[in-house]
Structure formats: C-alpha cells, structure tokens
Image: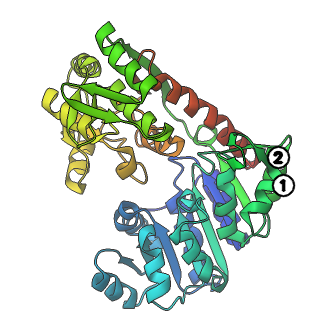
Amino acid sequence: MKFIPHDYQQYAIDFIESHPTAAVLLDMGLGKTAITLTALNNLLFDYFEIGRVLVIAPLRVARNTWPQEIDKWEHLTYIRYSVAVGTEKERLVALRKPASLYIINRENVPWLVEKTDFTYDAIVIDELSSFKNWSSKRFKALMKVRLFASRVIGLTGTPSGNGLMDLFAEFKVLDMGKRLGRFITKYRQDYFKPDKRNGQVVFSYAPLPGAEERIYEKISDITISMKATDHLRMPELIESEYKVKMSDTERKIYTEMCEQLVLQMKGDEVTAANAGVLSGKLSQMANGAVYTDDGAVLHIHDRKLDALEDIVESMNGKPLLVAYWFKHDAERIEKRVPCVQLDTDEAIACWNRGEIPVALIHPASAGHGLNLQSGGSTLVWFGITWSLELYQQTVARLYRQGQTAKTVVVQHIIAEGTIDERILRALKKKDKTQAALIAAVKAEVG
C-alpha cells in the first residue's frame, strides 16, 4: 500500500528527523507507528544517520503491530526487521539475524541490557508511559545504555496519566535528565509540595503554583503533541452512564465493608488491610462479587449483570465490546451472556470481521496497539479502572481513525452510591492534567 501522509503526519516525520531526542505525544489513531517508521526509513537509507534501531513496545504490539505496519507500506520495503520475543533462545536467535530494526517487548529490557551487547544507535520507546516508574528494573536497565544511542524517540498518547510526577522518568530516559533534572528528589523540590502525609511520611505530592507551565516550558523544545480531533474526521463520541441500584440488604453489606474493613457473610470472611485493598474490594462488590480471604468468590448481587443483559438485548445483534477488570466479573458475564474473550489473535480477527456479537476485553492486556474499530462502535465498562492511561487506550480501540460508524458509544454501568462514582470523578480529574500537557505543547500545523 502506498503511504501518502497527511499534513500532520509529515509534520511529525520532519520533527523526528530534525530532533535526535523526540517526545512524540500523538493521540490514539493518528498513525504514530507509520510516522515513526517513515522517519526511521529516511534516517537509515536517505541520510545514513543510523544503522541499527531498537524498538521497545508492549508484547502484543511488538509481536504484531510493528511487523504488520512494516509489511503494509510500500516505502518500507528495505527495512529488514527481527522480532525478539518468546523464550531466551528465540530472542537470541532473533537478535543475531541481520536487520535494521530489532523489536523487543518492554519486559525483556533488563535481560537485553544484562545478557547481550548493546549495539543500537537509535531507540524507539513505544508507549513511553511504560517507563514512568524511575525505580523500575526496566527504567534502570535502559538508563545504563541510553548514552550509547545517538537518537531516541518516545511515543505515547497518554504521557501523564497519573499526573505530572510521571514525566520525570519518562523525560529522563529521553534526555538523561537535561530538562527535568537527574534526581527525583530535586524534581519534587522544584515543582511539588507534600500533599497527603502522616507525620514525616509523604503519600502524595501536589504541584506548586505555576509548576505545570514551568515543566511544559522545559520539555517543549523536544516535544510534539497532537490530538486526533484536531486532524481527523473522528466520529462523535457519546459517553453515558447506566446506573443500577443495590437493594437495602446489598447496600448494608457494602457499607459494612466500607466502614469496618471486614465483611463476614455465609461463613466467609473478606478483609482489607489498607485503603488500596479496600478500594479493590469495594470495586468488586459494586460489580456484584468479591474474593474472600481464601480466594473463593462471594456473590453480592446481579445488578450489573442484569443491566448488561438489557444492553445486549437492546443492541439487536450489533457488536458490543465489554470491558471488565476482575476475573470473576468475566466468569459471571460468560455464564449470563454468550460472549468471546479477545485474548488471542484469532479472536481479534473474528471480532474485526464482525463475527462476534459480544466480546470481552481486559484493559491491562489489550489496552495498547489493538485495532478493533472494524468490529463495532459500542463499548460498555462493566467495571472501571483507576488508570486513566488504560481507560483512554481501551476507548481508543474503537474511537480511532478507520472507525466507519458516525458515533462511538461508551457506556459505564455504575452502581449508585459506590466507589464507581468516585473512580469516574478521579478519571475526569486526571484528564485535566493530561489535557493541559497536550495543549501546552500542541503542534501548530498548517
């Protein structure tokens, strides 16, 4: 297929070529893989500035998306690539093959650095947000060899899904600390103040007045940002809530867990050791069931299952994508509604051919890199995630370039008066920081 770039795509290609360090914050659906490959192709074979490229991506994206994009476009014919995933033996064989592009999944970055010779002069980090944790093994490993690469490209659509603190590690792996500093303690001192704390123990930080603007100014010279709605004829996105109400008895069970952190029911016990565990337990209970301390599933209610059944019936056979979070949610949905898990390449292909009326998707395993827009245009959140990144990426499986429907519907099944409502509010609050970052470095094209 012949690649004829849109104006915004050509702008992004030129930006990557002219910036040895580039943070490319492209909204979902704008074709960041094709853009990056085109720039790499030019740098490899037109300008001869690089010779060996390492691409780091989520597993499914590494295994499928990058090879498919290379094979798809005529102008990328000369790019030889090798996908280094699988067993250690398979990875070693792949890394020994003669190629210009070596693709590895992010989980194997520590192995790559420790067990092989690092001979790459360019690094592409697909989903830069995967390196937001400055204390993670993958971040520390990549920092050991970052100096050897003359070029580095960071790609993501969600750079600060959990706030400005994420940006420190993401940009340090790009510029080695030139803009936001080399140490997290200095970054905190310069831009944040302690927020929630217990004595000397600080649990969270809040930005100082003007910190956002100062941070954006620091990174603006190497950052390009674009939103899909600015450059594509996107379908209308309709978001709604389908509220369900628990009975007085069910509400009493939920409240008992919330107030006492211990629930005893039918001889089973559910306990929450801290606020994080409690949040998970309450989310499960809002969905209709909860894991007990011994791993059994304790049934609470079927309110959300009833709602989902109504939604499926109202679709009249049109495809429906259902996002779940807990394993027991999927098990209960499968018992109530005929559906298929999108956890294999074959299932995904069937969905895109329109052969699956109801499909289940887990945001953590299918949030990045999947194109599901051919299979349907309606998404239902049975259980909601706290992660803005996973939330946005999952919605973007349908709400993206190539979606032929005029509208994409995202419906949230919400249990009234439960943690569901708080999670939705938190997602919206986080999106304000995300939107501010996008707006601050948005590229002016045309």
Please say whether residue 70 is visible from this viewpoint.
Answer: yes
Please say whether residue 219 is visible from this viewpoint.
Answer: no
Q: Amino acid at mark 2?
A: Ala
Q: Specify whether 291 is left or right of 219.
A: left
Q: Quadrant of residue 357?
A: top left
Q: Specify whether 425 is left or right of 178.
A: left
Q: Are marks 2 and 1 in contact (CB under 8 Å)?
A: yes
Residue at x 79%, y 70% (from the top left corner): 178
- For label 2, the crowd category at 10 Å Cα-Cα, with few meaning under 14, some 14 to 19 and many 20 or more, is some
> Percent from the top left, x then y, of residue 432?
67, 35
Badge number at residue 139: none
Is residue 239 positioned above or below 204 on the image?
A: above
Q: Quadrant of residue 408?
A: top left
Residue at x 51%, y 54% (from the top left corner): 31
Query: Which callout, 2 or 1, points at the residue further toward the start of the chain?
Result: 1
Q: Quadrant of residue 278?
A: top left
> Percent from the top left, x then y, of residue 354?
23, 38
Q: Specify whether 124 is left or right of 99.
A: right
Please name the residue that numbered disc 1 is placed on.
190
> Percent from the top left, x then y, of residue 66?
42, 66
* Color encoding of the figure: rainbow
Instruction: Give the secondary structure at mark 1.
Output: helix
Q: Amino acid at mark 1?
A: Asp
Q: Of discs 2 and 1, which sits in the foreground?
A: 1
Is residue 240 positioned above or below 165 on the image?
A: above
Residue at x 57%, y 70% (from the top left corner): 139
Residue at x 42%, y 69% (from the top left corner): 107
Between residue 326 and residue 393, name the one nearer to us.
326
- Give how far apart the Cα atoms at labels 2 and 1 are: 8 Å
Q: Quadrant of the N terminus?
A: bottom left
> Percent from the top left, x then y, of residue 242?
39, 16
Please name the residue that numbered disc 2 is placed on.
211
